Amino acid sequence: MAIFLQSLISGVLIGGVYALIGIGLTIIFGVMRVINFAHGDILMIGMYLTYELFTLFHIDPFVSILITIPVMFLFGGLLQKIFINRIQGALPQNQILLTIGLGLIMSNTMMLVYTSNYKIITTSYSSDSFKILQSVINPDKFESLYNKGNALYFKAVSAGGDKAALLESAEKDYAEALTVKSDQSRGMNNLGVSLTALAALKSGQERDRLFNQADEQFSKAAPLSEDDFEVSYNQACALAAHAAVKTGAEADDLFARAFEKYKNAADSRPDSYDLFSAWAAGLYRQAQLKQGSEADALYAEAYEKYLTAKENNPAETEAAATVEQQAPRPLAEMKSDLAAAYGNYTLSYRLKPDSREAGISVSTPLAICFVITMVITIILYWFLMKTDTGQAIRATAQDRDAAQLMGINVKRMAIIAFGIGSALAGTAGALVSPTYYIFPQIGSMFTLKAFVITVLGGMGSIFGATLGGIIIGVAESLGAVYISSGWKDVVVFILFLLVLVFKPSGLMGKSKM
Amino acid sequence: MKILKNTHTAGLLPVISAAAILAVLLAFPHFVKTPYTLHMMILFFLSIIMGESWNILGGYTGQYSVGHAAYFGVGAYTTMMLMQFKHVPPWFGMWAGMAMVVVVALIIGSICFRLRGPYFVLASIAVAEIIRLSAMNLNGITNGAEGILATEIMPLKIGGLVITDFMTKVPFYYIGLGFALITILANYMVQHSKLGYCFQAIREDQDAAHSLGINLTVYKNIALVISAVLTSLAGSFYAIYVGFIDPPTVLGLDTSVQIVLICIIGGIGTILGPVIGSLVLVPLSEALRSNMIAHGIFMTGLVSEQSAVGTFLKENLGHAHALIYGILVVIVILFMPDGVLGFIKKMLQKKMP
């Protein structure tokens, strides 16, 4: 569900840009009855314009549309006046070929100037994202409680404040999460960790109770977990911490169980630094409680673990090698080394990594892009519906001859329409430039998409193009997730063919062509 | 119609000149042995095959397919895959390619011929793109984006006799010439048959043709199959001659556009059109590709070869050889809507009323 919504939302966001491209094409088609095959190439020019503004003048791509829009409008108007105007009324095939030719000229000229190397616009927010719907979109209650617990635990460990209170609420969240889903080893592990951390702050019977509860959680978690390194490590640390506050046989028992767990953990990850330091620290603690040869043996063992830990620490690999060469070292030196390393050693615990975050991640550039496209679309609707020029454009699109009879300057409308179409394509180019590679041949991809969008919505229908853009964005996004990213364009083209064959006038089209 | 009349009235002259040109072309490799010249001639033949094949559908029947790369690519892939993966000699693989293309063409035809005008153009592009993307993604069958490189071509044998081992460009020259003649002949036959008249009736007015009892779907599909089969021949020939194919080069939109441009520039719906188009396009694009234009600019002395602009031109002009297609097509559409051939005819008619 979360994956579905995630791809749905990113599909809608990119669909906004597609809509802009489609609206441009559809306005041109509506007014001039010419299918503009150079549309994607105009977009590509918009991308390069944005790129130049960004690299030369450090103008942010989203701000640069203020320059891109008028420049591309003029470019489109000129293109219409010089070339397209001459084939008004010619065979549709020839019109198509002329725009194909213009597109080839544009892409190859850009290739001549910029070569076919990829260009990238790297803004500070290019790879940023943020989360939305965190309280609504979580796969289940477990995740949200689990995440809340994690947040509280990290707060307790890192920041000051009332540690005990924070840990207690974390413990409650984990415990509640486990009542929702009782088979989650990560929940048990983290509950155990928070209990252990809490136990360290308490004393007497309460401390024993907490340690025992933690131990119980770890024991339950271990068989359920796929990779039980974290669980074994945490359990061992908890046992060692518990043993450290006990004496006599009770301590010995706990230490013995702790070392057994350390050994388990070491089997699954023999290259861990943390593990061997903790192990060595535990042995060192026990040695301090003992006397005579028993203690010496423990010191030696602790020192051995200490060396392994050093070896596993990439920062100290060389130091470890020199130490090893001097072995066997006298006991006194070993003791002093251990004392230096573990005199003030504090155990650290490991929360199970959290891979299933709640909420939906939204790419920041795409979100900004979507907001801008919406603003532009609304302005465009207003322009076409409310202004005189807009109404004249719509009149020309509806019936060219009648519009001319009504005194509308049809030729001027055609220039304006082509200008608007180009400005929209150029804007779309500017808007996607922070997220796409820029290269001269990218145009044909967008041209094809623009056709699919406009045909889907109905040639000449602006609302249809908006809808078509969003449908295509979503279809692509869902196709990439549920089929594969290689096949996502095939999904789009098949959709296109289905619409062409079964409803050639498009979803919003009125006249059958 | 006009050409038909001309051939009858002008009598033997065209026949004699055609025979003379053919004789020169047949003897050509005996006098010119430089591989580069032969290479150019082979590219010229290939371009004629592609153009004449498209001409049957686009020129005579008026169905502007901008997805002919689909047939070119399917032919190329079938022949190449059979040769590389199954060790089937290309002169058998070629037939398999044609059979495959017939199937593909009938599927495409049944979808696209429901549409007319610009919608047909868009549908033909979409189908070709689907095939390209499939070739790209079906790694296990087509080798995906990596493409297929021909490691060896089996020598052509009849009985035990080795006809050719394909070590030089000469066999390719004659095969290309042969294929080009076949496609030209196919165009001639189409133009002078009842079938061709039906095609041309569809081109002039679909609804009128329909009311005269011409079954549009059947005749359009016939035109498509003939055109597609010949295009697949071009594809197979290209694959074996170049020895390497990948989805963008044989199935890309650029290839489809190039096929159309050969006809548009020469003049569509005529036998000579694609030949003229190839005569214009092949040398120009090759001159750009091999940097002849850059060298020409240096020779005029406008730009020095050592200057920054000079090095830039030398390095980049070759990559932009498609620029010439764009410029030509714009000029042709704006100033000679009937292609170079039509333009020349018009000029001649003006001079000799």
Image: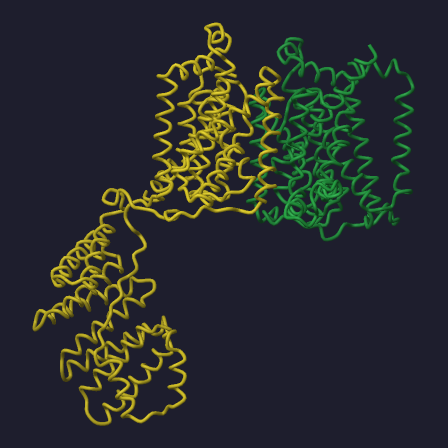
- The reply, left or right, for residue A168 in relation to residue A474 is left
Q: Position of residue A80 (x, y in %)?
A: 54, 22
Decide which of B3, B60 is in the foreground and name it. Answer: B3
Q: Residue B117 in the image: state x and y as whole percent.
A: 59, 20
Decide if residue B297 is on the left or right side of residue A296. right
In the depicted structure, whether residue A90 falls above or below residue A361: above
- Where does the image place residue B69, in percent across and percent down from the top left? 64, 35
Q: Is residue A287 visible?
A: yes
Residue extending furthest top? A405
**Residue in view at x 24 percent, y 68 percent:** A349
Q: Residue at x 61, y 46 (%)?
A: B142
Q: Is residue A141 above or below residue B287?
A: below
Q: Quadrant of residue A328?
A: bottom left
Give the position of the C terminus of chain B as an image quadrant.
top right
Q: Does residue B81 appear in the picture of this structure?
A: no
Up-down: is B116 above or below B104?
Answer: above
Q: Colour of chain A?
A: yellow
Q: Quadrant where the N terminus of chain B lies?
A: top right
Horizontally, is A14 left or right of B341 in the view? left
Return the x and y of residue B347 as percentages of the image width and height.
78, 17
Quadrant in the rendering for residue B73:
top right
- Residue placed at 53% from the left, 36% from the top? A445
The colour applied to the residues of chain B in this rendering is: green
